Amino acid sequence: MARWLPRSADLTRFCQKLNRVKTLEDDMMETSFNRCLSTIDLTLLGIGGMVGSGLYVLTGTVAKEIAGPAVIISFIIAGFASLLAALCYAEFGARVPKTGSAYMFTYVSVGEIWAFLIGWNVLLEYMIGGAAVARAWSGYLDSIFNHKIKNFTETHVGTWQVPFLARYPDFLAAAVLLVATAFISFGAKVSSWLNHVFSAISMGVILFILIMGFVLAQPKNWGAQEGGFAPYGLSGIMAGTATCFYAFVGFDVIAASSEEARNPQRAVPRAIAFSLGLATGAYILVSVVLTLMVPWHTLDPDSALADAFYRRGYAWAGFLVAAGSICAMNTVLLSNLFSLPRIVYAMAEDGLFFRVFSQVHPRTQVPVVGIVVFGLLMALLALVFDLEALVQFLSIGTLLAYTFVAASIIVLRFQQQKVDAPVPVAGGRPSPEPCEGPSAGELKEYESFSDKLQLVDRDKSKEHREPGQLKAAFEPYLEFLSDFHPGEVVTVAVVTLMVSAICLCSILVFGNTHLHLPTWSYSLLLILFSLGFLLSLLLIWAHEQQRSTQTFQIPLVPLSPALSIVLNIYLMLKLSYMTWLRFAIWLLLGLLVYFGYGIWHSKENLREPRPQRVSARYVVFPSGSLEERVQAVQPSSQPTTGLPDTNTEDCKR
């Protein structure tokens, strides 16, 4: 029975396969895509991904049902929370200018299986998000024409009452997705130009809303007679923050487009900062004018802005608001259709997904197979499925991606940086060794055993140490940590930090409601898990970081990513159990794809060396002597040839 159990060495190799990281090319600017996007192009892509239908619908909903006029504070807090995640994306996008966004960032720092699961979840997130926006676009346009499109479809096509299916097929939503897919397949420049047009119209409408809104503003609508500025108190503001946070999830399209940026080291961080700042400003200012134009408790959640202008006697302004809303939804559609095929391309290029999706059209230089296939799948979802029950699923995939990217920043910052080997010159003498300082934007790897020996023998008296090593000031107190390889303690501390954050947020969310903990145990657990979180943070901080590079770096590491991790986990735990159930089912499907295809076709799997194995066979003769026969065992991929008998070593004892 024991011979059927896996050996410890086999389990170790299997775990190493799951956690292997991606090997980056020496020239990360080399690509099969067309590097044609400027900072302005990326900024408008980010604005288009964030300022969508949420500006016209979400502001009114949160103001009336959750926070009142204090929705302004909710957007400020949500914007700051999103900034923590956005800065992590900005650093990675500048240092690793490859398409794939959160999937790629996790692959180069955490491990393969985690990267695949992040990519797998982001894939579904974009499909459901694009289909949901298409249905919202269709419904908004239909409402302008008094629902004539819906009535015609129900009369001539029919309706059905089937779980998870829509009441009637939405041909208009499917059609707009197919048209958008056609435009996206023409290339990045065409997509960017189309996004410019819709973004310009949308921003013009927003500017009109702000000017007219401040002209029509009535400060009394924030007065005590209307309920005050924060009628739902602090709890309403924080609940509104959790909802408003999802208005800023579109900035990752910039990171996904970094492989098509002309100068990603500068363009990606700037575009993320500009787009997030403009989007946050737009949400805050629109919330101000909306709650000043009419009393917050009289808002129409479905069409708050158009209804506010109508009630103030400017019915014609409703048509401008409707035009701006449709253009804003178009930019979100383009953002989803632009990002999704590129993430699928990155997974297929690495061998973790089907290779057909890694094909790039030679003329348009876009992954046309992925664009067409997933555009059709998105159109099918919008045509027949009821997406309202699945929309909340979008949140968990986004928050999980944010969490892993923040953790990846900490791991990456405390890793060794790659130093290129000396190149021999013409005279045969090797060139001088490069300085020990980090080369800009590159990762340092120690792969051979001799490299690790050099790390052990490194002079500990140096004032500056390599990234991942214990700081000299802490060595007298934490001397036992000096024996570990650089970065190992940090990796363990990051895992401990995430576990502590999960436990801490679980107590905060479920302690008083589902677990019904007594006050003393609730407080004790909060203190214990908070201490675990803080001690992990201090342990990470006690190690050397990478020195400043020429690319953007997020400040206050590890504090900033750690705060992002806590916030994301807290928001994930606030989601419904049905969302977690659907998430678990989707993860199981992803694991089947990974273990059935990805793990075997991964490029990193093909790069792994296949060393010869040596077996020793001992034969005991009746006389008591012992003969040792040493035979080389070749890998299965090579012809198996044993050593000749003349090389057999006989030992008589």
Image (spheres, rainbow, N blue to C red):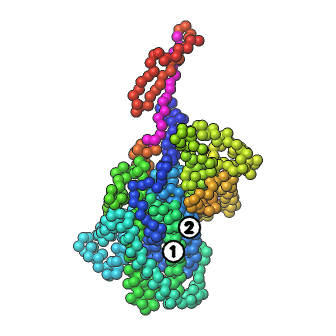
Q: Secondary structure at mark 2?
A: helix
Dividing the picture into quarters, in which one does residue 479 lie?
A: top right
Circle 2 sits on which residue? Answer: 83
Given residues 639 and 226, the one toward you in this image is 639
Q: Residue furthest right?
A: 476
Residue 306 falls left or right of residue 502? left
Amino acid under disc 1: Leu
- What percent of the width, then of the height, locates residue 613? 49, 29
Residue 12: horizontal and vertical position, in percent?
53, 38
Q: Which mark is residue 217?
A: none
According to the picture, the residue beneath numbered tag 1 turns out to be 278
Q: Is residue 115 visible?
A: no
Q: Farthest residue toward the top?
A: 623
Residue 377 in the figure: left or right of residue 405: left
610 part of magenta stretch? yes
Question: Which residue lies at the image location 51% right of the left edge and 30% below the top edge?
Answer: 2
Residue 11 falls inside the magenta stretch: no
Percent position of residue 383, x then y: 32, 66
- Secondary structure under badge 1? helix
- Taking depth in this image into account, of 564 and 90 the one nearest to the observer is 90
Instruction: Relative to 62, say whether 89 is above or below.
Output: above
Looking at the image, which residue is at 62% across and 48% down? 435
Considering every residue shown, the one lying at the far bottom of the view is: 313
The answer to which quarter of the image holds residue 49 is: bottom left
Q: Up-down: is 469 above or below 176?
A: above
Q: Amino acid at mark 2?
A: Leu
Question: What are the residue bounds of the magenta stretch?
Answer: 605-621
Eyeballing the image, is 14 above or below 150? above
How many residues crowd around disc 2 within 10 Å: few (fewer than 14), some, or many (20 or more)? Answer: many
- Please report the residue visible at 63 percent of the width from the left and 46 percent of the height from the top: 486
**Nearest to N terminus: mark 2 or mark 1:** 2
